[in-house]
Image (cartoon, rainbow, N blue to C red):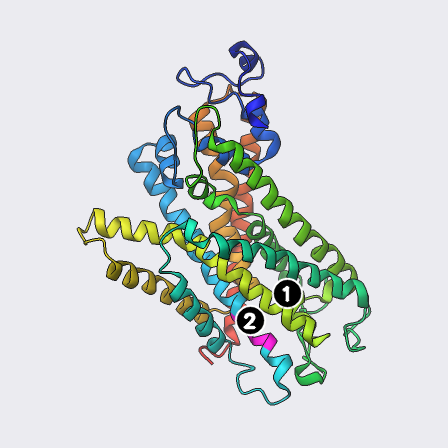
Amino acid sequence: MATHHCGRPQRQLEACGFPQRDGHDGSGCSRFAQCHGLPHMMVEMHEAVPGRRFDRYHELGQEAFGPKLGLWIVVPMQLVVEVGVDIVYMVTAGKSLQHAYSITCGDHCQLQDSIVFWIFLFAIVQLVLAQLPNFNSIAAISLAAAIMSISYSTIAWAIPAHYGHTLPGNIELLQPVSYDFPPFKPVQLVQAGGSAVQKAPEDLSTADRWFGAFTALGTIAFAYAGHNVVLEIQSTLPSTPHEPSKIAMWRGVKFAYGVVAIGYFPVALIGYWAYGNQVTDDIITFVSRPTWLVVIANLMVVVHVIGSYQIYAMPVYDMLESTLVGHLRFNPSMLLRLVTRSLYVSFTMFVAMTFPFFAALLGFFGGFAFSPTTYFLPSIMWLMIYRPSPMSWSWITNWAVIVFGVVLMFVSTIGGFRSLMTEAANFHFYT
């Protein structure tokens, strides 16, 4: 654990290139943190100053950049992240509900092509859950979401592993499995009520492939960018000099990312092995057999995003209500909570209904929102707070991460934005 390394003598820390900051042992764990990645850096910086806890991302930003500049740098970025994630979760839930309905009701589904209705249905659930006061009140929902995540991920790789290069129902892929650049845009194989209907594929140009790769980078950034709410979650844990909160939090982070790896890597590897470059952005909605299993998997996805939506929405609620009470002099009340949180849920619902493009949203928000707050802003704050020696191991590593994060932000944002515009060009809004 981190505490095993934090007590090393100062000369050992300096020999490693990590000098003390302002007389405290804040950077003693910097080598350990770098070895274990950006999530551990966030956990360590929660109590970077002895006797003080940075319970919000913007508080850490203020420590690094100053009271005013820190707010202007961090708050807009974090707000975009949290709102963007909730918009994506709205689309994800709507898409999963729609698919479960379409493969269950038969060939004459009145709502099969209307994702707007399913997003609205999901939003109603969120309007109710939004009235819960804090993270502790959604602990059971979060646990259920984590269990569902593992369960539907297992189904997502078990189906292609079992059926191999043929879709369930003995439906052949449009072409033999290939792992080269895709010759056409991956298409959904719709099997409403048991019938097989294949949409005509669209040819891909070289530009389509490049921008598609950029969008994919944003999707990866989105999938592994969970530490934007680390500080808020860590603030709910008790902390003492003998048992700082980072010990329990780091155990939780390792477990959470272990769950992510167990859930995501088999889906990516086995799904790509089975379907190659013809697979769409969501295997759960790519296959439709066995019907009962795919329906269960899609409903598990819905339960998962029900809990995850509130995890990212809670900091937004807190920010909005604190601003209304502290700066605009509103009286804290149940009515204020009801109106504020309901308006937020309604806003994310409206945007999701307007742009219900799952893959494009993942790529765009993964680059535009997650890359700054997840990949290079933590490294910048680490350098500002701990000030490692130039050309030391910590200094070089953090700067490498910063450069990578900036490049990732630009290319994936461009790819995601182009995908959004391409999808919107042929989309009938609100139908």
- Which comes before the other along the chain, label 2 or label 1? 2
The N terminus is located in which quarter?
top right
Taken as a whole, is the magenta stretch helix, strand or loop? Answer: helix
Examine the structure image and report whether residue 99 is included in the region drawn in magenta.
Answer: yes
| Residue plotted at (59% across, 26% down) | 32
Q: Amino acid at mark 1?
A: Asp
In the visual, does 149 lie left or right of 80?
Answer: right
Q: CA distance from mark 2 to mark 1?
A: 10 Å
Q: Amino acid at mark 2?
A: Lys
| Figure disc tally | 2
In the visual, does 232 lie left or right of 292?
Answer: left
Secondary structure found at label 1? loop
The image position of residue 263, as x and y in percent, is 66, 53
In the visual, does 203 lie left or right of 40?
Answer: right
The reply to whether residue 203 is visible in this rendering is: no
Mark 1 surroundings: few (<14), some (14-19) or many (≥20) residues within 10 A:
some
| Residue plotted at (40% across, 25% down) | 49
Q: Is residue 337 above or below residue 375?
A: below
Tell me where residue 404 sits by quadrant: top right
| Residue plotted at (54% across, 53% down) | 143
Q: What number is the disc on residue 282? A: 1
Question: Which sits in the foreground, 156 or 187?
Answer: 156
The image position of residue 326, as x and y in percent, is 22, 46
- The magenta segment is 94-100
Tell me where residue 399 sits by quadrant: top right
Mark 2 surroundings: few (<14), some (14-19) or many (≥20) residues within 10 A:
many
Examine the structure image and report whether residue 414 is included in the region drawn in magenta.
Answer: no
Q: What number is the disc on residue 95? A: 2
The image position of residue 255, as x and y in percent, is 61, 43
Secondary structure found at label 2? helix
Q: Residue furthest top?
A: 11
The image position of residue 409, as x and y in percent, is 52, 48
